[in-house]
Amino acid sequence: MQKLFTILALALAAFPQTPTGLAVLQATSKQVQLSWTGGQPAYVVERKPLGGVYSALPSNTDPATSTYTDSAIAPYETYTYRVRTRLSPTTLSDPSDEFTVGPPPTGLSLASPLNPAITAYSLTTPANFGARLRIALDSNGDPAIAYYIYSPQEDPAKSFVEFVSWNRVTYKWNTPRKVAMTGDMLGAPILARDAASNTWGVAYGKYGGNPRIALSRDNGDTWSDNDFLDCADSSCGAPALAMGAGKLHLAVLRSPEGVRYVTGSINEPASAWQSQLVPKPIGGFEAIGPVDLAVDSANQPAVAFWSNTDSYNLILGVWRPGQQTQIAMDTAGYQTDAPEVDLKFAGASARLLAVARRTEEFYNRYDQNLWLLRDLGGAFSVPQNLPTDGEVTLGVPSLAVGSAGQISVAATEVGGSGIDVRCGSMKLIDQPSESGPWQACSPIARDGQPFYDVNFPRVIYAPNDARYIIFTNTGADTQYPGVVVWRER
């Protein structure tokens, strides 16, 4: 009997045991760290790219700790890993379980689904769930999103902002986190991140209250929330926010005095931040908003805002600290009831996307409301009218600028005849090169499937110049009800 046990033990030893307990300890755009249950003399780690086949990685496993660090990765590639025990070059165990890591999948994914436990959401009212989206990138170049949820009890005091981000380790979207109870919010929750301190910020305004800034230093898990400007004797609008080099930059329309610029260290209390009044542009009578703010490649801020005059004409101004406000464009004497502006940078050069009426054709043709301006160094370019895919008017636009100056605009249909429209209701208007032709279409099919209604689109370029587009889909009978992300490649 002892001899039989010995033979069986030798036979089992000839068959290597399959590794167990494979786990991903860390997954970033620079490296992936794996661990598993050890005890065997040698292992082989195998990896395959998305859509590819497995190949063995260079052996650097430590049998004592059973870990492996893969630093030879492409930052925006998706990989699947598995491990085998190796007794000899030709004797390998069956593979372990697999783990997939990487950025969000290409195409569509659902970042924040409608909560089925909340039955009071009116899905045809986009202001209720996932409203007023904003997007920023984390340290891996993956998207994070802030959005507003209006109280399902229709009680403004119970409304709040949520934050959701992508997790490379689990290869899925994290559970949304509540940023702050906002009450009846003004404008959108503006999301930004300071790379130097890895601090997230969300700025928001409140009807009848002071503008506030919420900060998170643990990747969005917990948030602190504070006022940053006193509006007791005035009326404050929705704030704009940018962050960089350890500093916050905020701008708020504080009527009747004008636009207030507030800045300070992320590590200081709001009471220590500095505030100053932004000068009006020449000919400007009163700042009316909206206000936007961005930092350039050197983390230097600029503020863009609209001002009225003593006529129907409106002026769009751009201000940098220490300078006078520069006039970027006006409305050529035409009345515009709801102007908009989005400010971005190509290096140190500003780009502006404006929504305004500035031609007689505004009410005859439906493609005369989007205007792009480029900072030429001392002056802005003549406003360029952007195509809108047939006879449609686009609203709530979002501007993105790539590393080579390429431009994309995401917007949604808000009116028009629909004549000659080829693409879905969420438009992507882009100029692949700074001097090239414009294109206007959509990553979503014209028939809208699988979407019922698209709202609040935003676009951003990842560091590899692939685009992310986010939007809210308010259709309960679709595959993607909630906050949706589209990744280009």
Image (cartoon, helix red, strand yellow):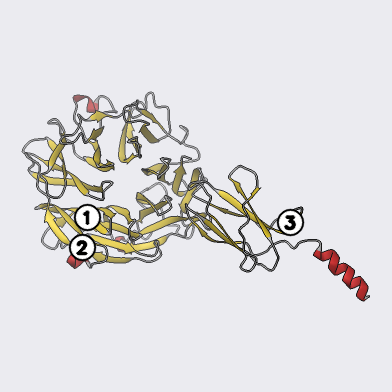
Query: Which numbered disc, 2 or 1, marks the residue that appears first in the sequence?
Result: 2
Most extreme residue toward the bottom, as rendered?
A: 2
Q: Nearer the viewer, mark 2 or mark 3?
A: 3
Left or right: residue 65 versus residue 227 is: right
Residue at image position (65%, 65%) is: 63
Residue at image position (18%, 34%) is: 380
Residue at image position (27%, 25%) is: 365
**Viewer-nearest residue: 125 or 267:** 267
Query: Which numbered disc, 2 or 3, marks the residue that appears first in the sequence?
Result: 3
How far apart marks 3 and 1 lie (CA) works out to: 57 Å
Tag count: 3
* Mark 2 residue crowding within 10 angstroms, few (<14) / some (14–19) / many (20+): many
How far apart marks 2 and 3 lie (CA) works out to: 59 Å
Q: Which mark is residue 189?
A: none
Q: Is residue 129 visible?
A: no
User: What kind of element bears circle 3?
Assistant: loop
* Relative image position of residue 93 (x, y in whole percent): 74, 57
Q: Nearer the viewer, mark 3 or mark 1?
A: 3
Left or right: residue 324 versus residue 472 is: left
Q: Are the two marked residues, 2 and 1, in contact with CB atoms closer than 8 angstroms?
A: yes
Q: Quadrant of the N terminus?
A: bottom right
Quarter-of-image position of residue 276: bottom left
**Residue hosting label 2:** 228
Left or right: residue 454 versus residue 311 is: right
User: What kind of element bears circle 2?
Assistant: loop
Q: Which amino acid type is marked by label 2?
A: Phe
